[in-house]
Amino acid sequence: MPEYKHLYRYTLQNANEFDEVEQWRESHRENCKCANDITDAINSHYHDNRLDNCVQSMIDKYGFDRVNWVIANTIREGIQDGRYSKENKKWAEGFDVLSSDQNWHFCVTAHPGLVNVFANQLRAAWNELGLFDKAAVTDETNYENQVLILKPTVLKNEYRQPDFQLFYATDGFGCDPKKIGARVFGFFLKDDEFTSFRRHDFYGVANDAALPDWALDKLNEIREKLVIEDCDTGMEASPS
C-alpha cells in the first residue's frame, strides 16, 4: 500500500504559530493537485448524462483522507448551494476543515451536481470498509479500563480496519475528562501492542453490543483478570 503525503489539518495561521509552515505548504499543494485531478476525473467520466464511478482511482492516488478532505471542503465552501444534498452537507460538516481564505484554492471546480454524485460514490466506498463510527459508543466519559473506539483517521492506511479501532485503555490523564492531560495509554485489543493516543483521537467508549465475538471474549478475559487482581489486593490489605 502506498505511503501518502501527510494531510495537514490546520490553517496557515496555525502553522505560523507552531513553526509548521512548510508542512502546511506541502499539504496545501497536494490538496490543490487532488482537487484538480478530481475535477479532471469527473469531467472525463461524465457522458450520456451519467457519471461513471471514478472514485477509486482518486483514492488510490491520494488516499481516503485527502480525497475526503478535499470533497468535504468543496461542499462546505458551497454550503448554500442546493445542488448538494442534505446528507452530503451533513457529512462534510463532520470534518474539522478550519475556515480560511486559502480553502477556495482546493475546491473541485466540476459542476456541483456532479461533485454531489462523486461525494455519494466516495461515501459508499468509505462505508464498504465497515468501520466503527460514533453510533457504536456509549455516553461513558471515563476511559480507564474500557474498550475505546479509535477514529479511523488516526490509523495508518494498512490498519484502517474495524478490528484495529478497538483499543483497551489502561491509564493516563486523558482517561479522565476532568484532568488537564490528554494522553490515554493502553493496547490494541487485536494484537496487544501497547501505545498511547490523545483523548480526542477516540469516538468514545465502545458499546458492548457493537463488539464482535472475538473482542467480547477478550474483554471478558480482561475483566475476569481485573476482578481476580482486585480480590488478591483486598486480601493482602486485610488484617491478619
Image (cartoon, rainbow, N blue to C red):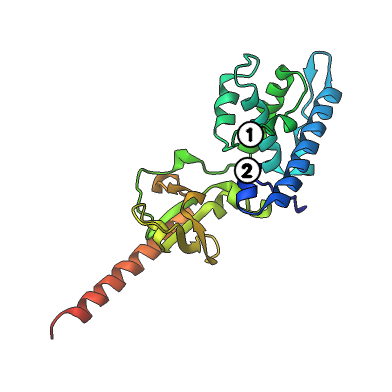
Residue at (33%, 53%) from the top-left corner? 178
**On the image, numbered disc 1 is attached to which residue?**
100
Number of on-image labels: 2
Residue 216 disc label:
none
Can you give x and y, in whole percent of width and height, for residue 139 in the image? 35, 43
Residue at the extreme left: 239
Determine which quarter of the picture holds residue 233. Answer: bottom left
Q: Quadrant of the C terminus?
A: bottom left
Q: Nearer the viewer, residue 31 or 85?
A: 31
Residue 132 visible to an observer of this rendering:
yes
- Name the residue tied to disc 2: 13
| Nearer-N-terminus badge (2/1) | 2
Residue 129 location in percent, x, y?
A: 63, 42
Determine contact: label 2, label 1, CB under 8 Å: yes
| Residue 10 in view (yes/no) | no
Q: Position of residue 157 (x, y in %)?
A: 67, 51
Q: Is residue 55 above or below residue 232?
A: above
Left/right placement of residue 136 relative to residue 82 reads left
Which residue shows up at 54% across the image and 47% down it?
151
From what the image shows, is residue 43 above or below residue 212?
A: above
Position of residue 184 measured from the top left corner of the image (x, y, whole percent): 45, 60
Nearer the camera: disc 2 or disc 1: 2
At 43% from the left and 55% from the top, the residue drawn is 147
What amino acid does circle 2 point to? Answer: Gln
Instruction: Classify residue 33 as left or right of residue 97.
Output: right
